[in-house]
Image (spheres, rainbow, N blue to C red):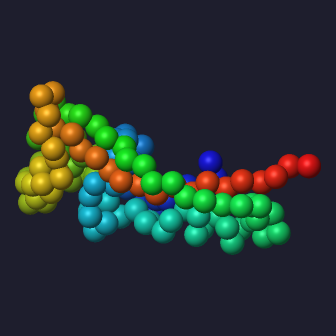
């Protein structure tokens, strides 16, 4: 759907988003460096006179159950290009752990999102 996702502004942020379904969604902006401008705000001005006949938005949640939260945190830090001794690594784990909900299968991380729905009536 056009205009729903954000445009990454740094290659590391793009890498994190490509490799992990969560990408930057669970991390502070200063870590991932992605543009957090809502996609709809980028797309609508570019449509010119081809604006949709109607639009709406929907809220949704993406969840991922991880058997090993520490391994996922290390994976994310690697994708961000952080060195093994980077002092942000323990902070990243702590940040994710605060968001995680324990489950019988490990930990569930959930990312709440809002997506635009654009509708054009075709003749």
Q: What residue occupies the far top of the structure in this picture?
A: 105
Along the line of sight, the residue nearer the viewer: 112 or 96: 112
Residue at image x 11%, y 58%? 91
The location of residue 35, given as percent across then percent down, is 44, 66
Is 48 located above or below residue 79 in the figure? Answer: below
Left or right: residue 38 versus residue 77 is right
The answer, for residue 18, to whether it is visible in the render is yes
Occupied quadrant, residue 75:
top left
Instruction: Judge left or right: residue 47 versus residue 80.
Output: right
In terms of depth relative to the viewer, which is nearer, 115 or 15?
115
Q: Is residue 24 left or right of residue 102?
A: right
Give the x, y percent position of residue 6: 49, 59
Residue 45 in the image: x percent, y percent? 69, 72
User: Picture coordinates of residue 33 (x, y %)?
Assistant: 35, 64
- What residue do we see at 28% from left, 37% from top? 64
Q: Which residue is rendered at x = 78% and y = 70% of the image?
A: 48
Left/right placement of residue 103 relative to residue 24 reads left
Q: Residue at x 61, y 54 (%)?
A: 117
| Nearest to the observer: residue 67 or residue 30 | 67
- Vertical side of 111 occupied by 32: above or below: below
Count of number-bearing discs: 0
Residue 13 occupies quadrant: bottom left
Q: Is residue 7 visible?
A: no
Residue 11, by quadrant, is: bottom left
């Amino acid at each position: 759907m056009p205009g729903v996702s954000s445009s990454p502004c740094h290659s590391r942020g793009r890498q994190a988003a490509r490799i992990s379904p969560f990408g930057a969604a669970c991390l502070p902006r200063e870590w991932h460096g992605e543009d957090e401008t809502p996609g709809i705000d980028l797309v609508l001005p570019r449509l010119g006179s081809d604006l949709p006949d109607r639009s709406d938005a929907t809220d949704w949640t993406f969840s991922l159950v991880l058997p090993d939260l520490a391994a996922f945190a290390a994976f994310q830090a690697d994708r961000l290009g952080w060195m093994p001794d980077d002092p942000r690594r323990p902070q990243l784990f702590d940040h994710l752990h605060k968001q995680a909900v324990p489950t019988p299968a490990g930990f569930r991380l959930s990312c709440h999102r809002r997506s635009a729905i654009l509708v054009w009536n075709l003749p």
